[in-house]
Image (tube, helix red, strand yellow):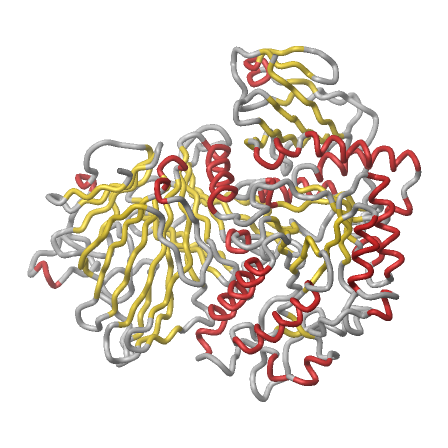
Amino acid sequence: MSITYNQENHIFTLNTKHSTYQMKVDNFGILLHLYYGVKISGSADYLLTCYDRGFSGNLYDMGNTRIYSMDVQPQEYPVLGVGDYRNSALVIRNADGSECCDLRYVNHEIKKGKYSLSGLPAVYAKEEEAETLRIVLEDSISSVQVQLFFGVLESEDIITRSAKILNLGADTITVEKAASACLDYISGDYDLITFYGRHAMERNFQRAEILHGSTVIGSRRGTSSHQYNPAVIITDKNTTEDFGNCYGMLFVYSGSFMCEAEKDQFGQTRVLMGLQSDLFHYPLSENEALTVPETVLSFSSSGFGELSRQYHHCIREHICRGNYAHKFRPVLVNSWETAYFDFDGDAICGLAEDAVELGIDMVVMDDGWFGKRNDDNSGLGDWQVNEQKLGCTLGELIQRVNKNGVKFGIWIEPEMVSEDSDLYRKHPDWAMHILGRKPIRGRNQLVLDFSRQEVRDAVFESICNVLNQGNIEYVKWDMNRSLSDIYSMEYAQGRVTYEYMLGVYDFLEKLTQKYPNILIEGCSGGGGRFDAGMLYYTPQIWCSDNTDALDRLQIQYGTSFFYPACTMASHVSAVPNHQTGRTISLQTRGVVAMAGMFGYELDTRKLNEEEKEEVKEQIRQYKKHQELIQNGNYYRLSNPFCDTYAAWSFVSKNREQVLLNAVILENHGNMPVSYVKLKGLIEDAVYEDIQTGKCYYGSALMHAGIPLPIELVEYPAYQIELRKK
C-alpha cells in the first residue's frame, strides 16, 4: 500500500516510487508534518523538538510547561488564532467576530482510488493507480470541521492535496483565507522558483532565495493571470537541471490564487498554496461547505528536469481528458493574423484551398464572424452568425471548407459582453458591475456574471445554436480581460470570484460532454489562463499572443517546467512579427513552433513558391515527429535567458528515438562553437544521425555533446533526428 497508518505512533506515511511524505497526530490531536523528500524507512517523528521559545505561546493543554508552541511546530494545516504567528492555511471569522479555529484530529479513512472534487477540476486515476487518505480535523467550540484529502499516485511520484471546510455549527462563519497545501520544512535553506510575466511575455523563470519574512505571489485578477503562474518550485540552493532536491506545487485552479513562502525566526520554511485572500470572504451557514481547489505535489532528487517530466506525465495522463487527451492534434491555420476582422466567407475558403496545397489540416475562423463585430468595440455576447458578412450561412461555409478535405474551427469568447451589443441592451444587469458605479472597461468589454446560472444557461444555448450549424471540430475559447467590479446579485460579495470560476468550469463541463469530438483550445489574451484547471477541460492552451520566435523560446522554456509540449499551442507567424517587428527566418520559426502543438498564424496567400515548399516540408517533419513531440520525454538542454543558444529535445520512452532542436541566439565575429549535451539516452547505445548518417555513442552525446554549425546568418535553427541502431 502507498498509504499506511501506524496506530501505535499515530503516524501516516505516504510513499510514492521515489519519495516519502510523513505526518503525525501528536498527543494533543495536532496534525504535525514530519518529512517530505527522498524515500525513507521507519518513522521520522524523532525530528520533532520541543524547547521553551520566548514570546511563542504555549498550548493550554501543556499546563505550566512551556516547551510546546504552535509557533514552532511543523504542521499540515496551520490556522490563525492558536499561537502560530506564521502564515496560515486557514483563517476563520466566527459569528462573534473572533478569528480562531483550533483544529484537532477526529478520525481518518484510507481507501483505494483517487478522490474527486465536486464542481472542480482535479487529478483523476483508475482505482488501482491511486489511494486516498482523508483526515478529519475539528474545532470543538465552533464545530468547524476540515477534511484534508491526500491522493497518492505511487508510480507517478505524485501526491495531491485538497481541503473541505464544513460548518457543523448553528452560527454562520466566514472563511477569510483557505489554502489546500502547506509544506513545512524544519531545516534547510531554499530558493523559490516562480514564473512571472505580462501579456505577450508570460512565464519568465525567476529564482530567488527564501529569506526571513514572506515572499508572496498570486493573482487578484479573477484568472490565474499573465503576471504569475499558479505553480512554484521549492529547491535546495545547489539544485540544477539534473542534480539536487526540488519540490513542485501546482494549483489546479484558473482563478485568483496566492502562494506564500516564509522563513521564520528559527530558520524554518513554510510554503502555502491556495485561494487568493483578497476579495475573498466566504460565509458558511450551518452544514454548508467550501472545497479548496487541489494542489499537486511532486518531489525530485534528480533536479528540475526530472520534476518537470513527472508533472508532464501527470498532466498528460491524469488531468487532460476527452478524445484529444492522447489523440494527435490537427495542424491548423488561424485567420486572426491573416485578416483580423477583415474577412468574408470567400477569404476563409481561400485559406482552406491554400491549406489543401500546403498539407494543413484545419482552418480556424477567429474573431469577427458574429453579431456586428467588425472591431473589438462591439458585438460580444451576440452569438449569432453574421451571414451578411460571410455571404452565406455558417453551415454552407463549413461545407465549402470540408469539401476541400479541410477541418473547420471557430473562435468564441463566452464570458464577455460588449456594451454595444443586443445582449447588453437587453440584459445590462448580466454584466458584472458594482451598483451605482461606472464599470471598469478592459479591451472595451465587460465580464458576464458567470456565477449566475441563468446567465450561463443563456450563453450556453446561443453557443450551442452556433455549434449545431455544421461540422465544427475545434473551438478556441478566449477570455480577453481581467475581472474587476467584483459584485453579484446572486451571492455574498466575498464568494463571487470563486463562484464565477465554478460557473466557468460548469459551462466547460457541459460543453465537453455535449460535444466530445470537438477539440477545445483555451486562451486568455494568450497565456493569461495557462493552468492545470483549464487543461482539465481544454487539452491545449494558446501559449502566448506573442508569436515572435525569439520571445517564444523564453516563454516556452518557462512553461515547460510544469506543462508538457502537448498543452502548448505554438504557431508560425508572419514577419515582420506583429508583436515585436522582428524578422526571423521561416526555418527558425518552424523549429520553435514545433516545440508545441503546431500551426500557422499568417496569410498563406502571401507565401511565395519557395516558402510554400518550406511550409510543406515543415508539416511533413512535424507529422513525422508528432508522436515524439506530443508524448515523448522532454529535456531542456540550455537556458535561453543566459546561454548563447536555446536547445531542447524529445526522447521516446524506450530512448531509441531523439529529436534535438537548437536555435543560435547570438552571432559574433570569430564565434566559438557551441556544444549541446543531450540527456536521457542509453549510454552504450549507438545513435545514427538520420540526415547525415553519422553515428555517435549515447555516452559521447551526453557527456561531450554535439557541435552546432557556425553560420553567418541571424538566429539559425537546427533539428537533428537521431535513432538507436
Q: x, y percentage for residue 5?
A: 19, 44
Query: Is 341 placed left or right of 720 in the picture?
Result: right
At 78% from the left and 21% from the top, the residue drawn is: 670
Query: Is 696 placed left or right of 604 in the picture?
Result: left
Q: How many marks?
A: 0
Of the pair 135 and 528, the residue shown nearer to us: 135
Of the pair 587 and 214, the residue shown nearer to us: 587
Quadrant containing the C terminus is: top right
Q: Quadrant of residue 664?
A: top right
Query: Is 538 placed left or right of 99 in the picture?
Result: right
Q: x, y percentage for residue 53?
A: 19, 53
At 43% from the left and 49% from the top, the residue drawn is: 123
Q: Is residue 202 above or below residue 257?
A: above
Q: Is residue 438 above or below residue 105?
A: below
At 23% from the left and 59% from the top, the residue drawn is: 136
At 78% from the left and 47% from the top, the residue drawn is: 406
| Residue 248 visible, this angle | yes
**The furthest residue to the bottom:** 436
Of the pair 585 and 695, the residue shown nearer to us: 695
Q: x, y percentage for residue 654?
A: 52, 23
Q: Quadrant of residue 335?
A: bottom right
Of the pair 190 and 453, the residue shown nearer to us: 453
**The furthest residue to the right:** 608
Quadrant containing the N terminus is: top left
Q: x, y percentage for residue 128?
A: 35, 40
| Residue 35 visible, this angle | no
